[in-house]
Image (cartoon, helix red, strand yellow):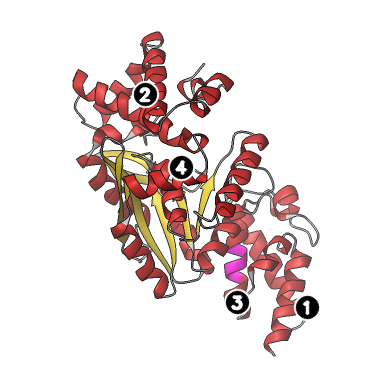
Amino acid sequence: MNALEIKEIVHNLIVEIAEDMDVEAEKVTDDAHFIKDVGLDSMALLEVLATMEKKFGVAIPETEFPNLTTVNKCVATVEKYLALKA
Amino acid sequence: MGLSEQFQTPAIFAAIQSSSSIEAVRDLIVQTGRNWFLEHPDQRSTIYKNAHSFGLPLDETFIEDFSYNLFLHYFEKLLPLFGGARELSDFVQKNIDCSDALACIKDQRSRGNGLLLAGAHFGAVELIVPALANNFIPVTPVLKFKTAGFSKAARERAQEMYKSGFFGEIDFVEIGKPDTIAALDMAAVLRRQECLLTMLDEKTDYSVPVTLLGKQVFGGAGLDRLVKFTRANVTVAFIAMVRTGDLSYRINIIPIDNCQEELAQKLATASEQVIKKNPEQWYFLHEEVSFVT
């Protein structure tokens, strides 16, 4: 799976969660901060973490949690742990 | 000035620190609370209204017992200000029966499970963290501090306790602050197979209707989502510290079926078991309860 495919999956995931929270999906851009710019809360971030781990088959350690704040940062994190798994 | 603020004045803090004994601190807090109630007779109406809604006794004896227990709640909250870590450790060792709770916690941790301990506005909840930390159980309470100053003071106090050698390390997950990742921090605690202590009856965006003593209220505080998305072995338990006599306490832990279905209701039902035995210790009655209308 390449970075573009990962990005599409992560982007769609964030949009889905944002819509569930009645947040405008247009706010979800590659570098928009999930909390400050998009309006998600920390429980939504936990859902993002759990879904990414399940979807990509990776375990993301807690040291990475503070980095899970934008689509691009999530993609970079997933790529890093997919590479470690390979 | 509200009841809570009444106990958070420099004069009260100074009086606690100069008290001669723990009993003297308790008497000071109880007397201060009684004086406040005399000046605010209208406050009883909230207690009457809530007690009536939940079908609890409405006689004066109950209200008196309830008020006394409410003041004890503040006494327990402020107790760490009296003396140092050694005094608090001595108090815990002498007055709190943790035996069943420790056995349950140790058993769950030996199985590699994180423990989500869900407490309620009941009994001596403020003493649960010192009691567990005094037994070197890694525990992280989820707290909301009114000011950055309170947050700093609490962290400094926890560090002092840890450095004393009488207590294990106490960390906090702070909620209610902008831009925090509290839910991720809570999941991290559970993934480390430690104990996370949080409240089940605080109303959050993720609370759901549950039945408690025959009434529909908002409960669960989103703990079902926390467990679901933590993706680790987590045991959920209701925890309460019951006042069993004059300055004596016991921690009760009721493990909940691990299935996340209806978790909020299962926690409410477990809390109901404890509340029914000691309704006068349920200080939730003093607050504006979020009934489902």
Q: Amino acid at mark 3?
A: Lys
Mark 1 or mark 4, which is nearer to you? 4
Tags 4 and 3 both on a single chain:
no
Closer to the N terminus: mark 2 or mark 4? 2
| Badge number at residue A3 | 1
| Residue at 51% across, 45% down | B85
| Badge number at residue B87 | 4
Spot occupied by residue B135 in the image (x, y as percentages of width and height)? 42, 58
Tags 1 and 4 both on a single chain:
no
Q: Amino acid at mark 1?
A: Ala
Q: Residue furthest bottom?
A: A86
| Badge number at residue B27 | 2
Mark 4 to mark 3: distance in Å? 51 Å
Q: Amino acid at mark 2?
A: Asp
Q: Which residue is mark 3?
A: A55
Q: Amino acid at mark 4?
A: Glu
**Image quadrant occupied by the N terminus of chain A:** bottom right
Mark 1 to mark 4: distance in Å? 58 Å
Instruction: Indicate left or right for B178 with B105 as reference.
Output: right
Tags 3 and 1 both on a single chain:
yes
Q: Which residues are magenta?
A: A47-51
- Secondary structure of the residue carrying tag 1 is helix
- Secondary structure of the residue carrying tag 3 is helix
Closer to the N terminus: mark 3 or mark 1? 1
Tags 2 and 1 both on a single chain:
no
Q: Main secondary structure of the magenta part?
A: helix
Instruction: Indicate left or right for B188 with B278 as reference.
Output: right
